Image: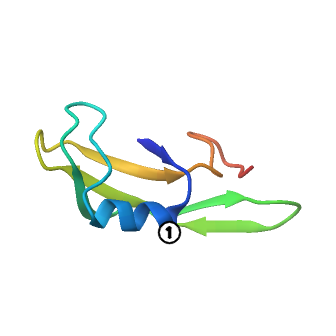
Amino acid sequence: MMIVGSPHRDEAALLAGEIPCPGCSAPLRPHGHACIRSVRGLGDARVTVQPRRARCAGCGRTQVLLPAALSVRRADSC
């Protein structure tokens, strides 16, 4: 799982092959989406997201690109 700053900006970088694999540094390529996640936002608000999944062109490992506003393994957003 990788943390990304802005999903929209990082989507363009992913399509351009500008995000390196953390394991082998080869470019990551789009590979669908991860499971839909529902997290608590501010107050009583619920936020539903479906993070982007990417596959490494070199080693074949997959990564979930999780927005930075969501903490890893947490049910709350920042």
- Place residue 61 in its image quadrant: top left
- The vertical placement of 58 against 41, above or below, is above
**Colour scheme in use:** rainbow
In percent of width and height, residue 76 lies at 72, 49
* Residue in the image at 18% along x and 42% along y: 26
Q: Which residue is mark 1?
A: 8
Which residue is at the front of the view, 67 or 25? 25
Q: Is residue 19 visible?
A: yes
Extreme residue toward the top, this view: 23
In percent of width and height, residue 44 lies at 86, 64
- The vertical placement of 43 against 55, above or below, is below
* Residue in the image at 25% along x and 57% along y: 17
Q: Please state, as top left, top right, bottom left or bottom right, where the N terminus lies in the image.
A: top left
Count the labels in the image.
1
- Left or right: residue 12 versus residue 32 is right
Q: Is residue 50 visible?
A: no
Q: Mark 1 packing: few (<14 Cα in 10 Å), some, or many (20+)?
A: few
- Left or right: residue 47 versus residue 43 is left
- Left or right: residue 22 versus residue 41 is left
* Residue in the image at 48% along x and 65% along y: 9
- Place residue 32 in its image quadrant: bottom left
Considering the numbered disc 1 on the image, is that residue within a helix, a strand or a loop? helix
- Place residue 35 in its image quadrant: bottom left
- Kind of residue indicated by mark 1: His
In percent of width and height, residue 38 lies at 61, 62
* Residue in the image at 44% along x and 60% along y: 10
In percent of width and height, residue 46 lies at 73, 66
Which residue is at the front of the view, 51 or 27? 27
